Image (spheres, grey):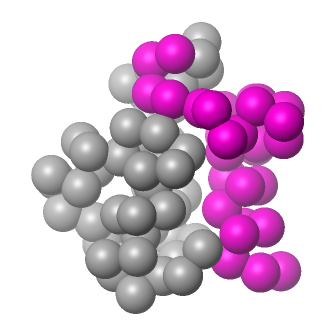
Amino acid sequence: MTNIEKYDQLFIKILRVAPEELANLRYRRHKSWDSIGHMDLMNAMEETFGVNMGTLDVLDFSSYQKGKEILAKYDVTI
């Protein structure tokens, strides 16, 4: 499985969104992406990609697109 497939699957499984919703997905704009969903997603991202994101990056991880930029800081190419 490629990194983009892993990335997409985390959103789909944890936040229970359809694949077509991913591109425009933003924190607190979907009922499943609340504070608890956010922490579940961040934990899964760290485990899946073997990174330990800093607090500011966790807080800044505010959309599907922004997440790609943040993971790139940890040498994870999506």
Rendered position, 42 above or below 5: above
Q: Which residue is more in the foreground, 57 or 49? A: 57
Quadrant in which the C terminus appears:
bottom right
The overriding secondary structure of the stretch rendered in magenta is helix
Quadrant in which the N terminus appears:
bottom right
Q: Which residue is more in the foreground, 69 or 38? A: 69
Rendered position, 27 above or below 28: below
x 45%, y 27%: residue: 27
Q: In the picture provided, is 46 more to the left or to the right than 49?
A: left
Q: In the picture provided, is 75 more to the left or to the right than 30?
A: left
> Magenta part of the protein: which range?
1-29
Horizontal and vertical percent for residue 58?
28, 50
Judge whether residue 24 is colored magenta.
yes
Rendered position, 28 above or below 72: above
Q: Quadrant of residue 5?
A: bottom right
Horizontal and vertical percent for residue 53?
28, 66
Q: Quadrant of residue 15?
A: top right
Judge whether residue 22 is colored magenta.
yes
Q: In the picture provided, is 11 more to the left or to the right than 40?
A: right
x 84%, y 41%: residue: 19
Horizontal and vertical percent for residue 17?
76, 30
x 60%, y 32%: residue: 25
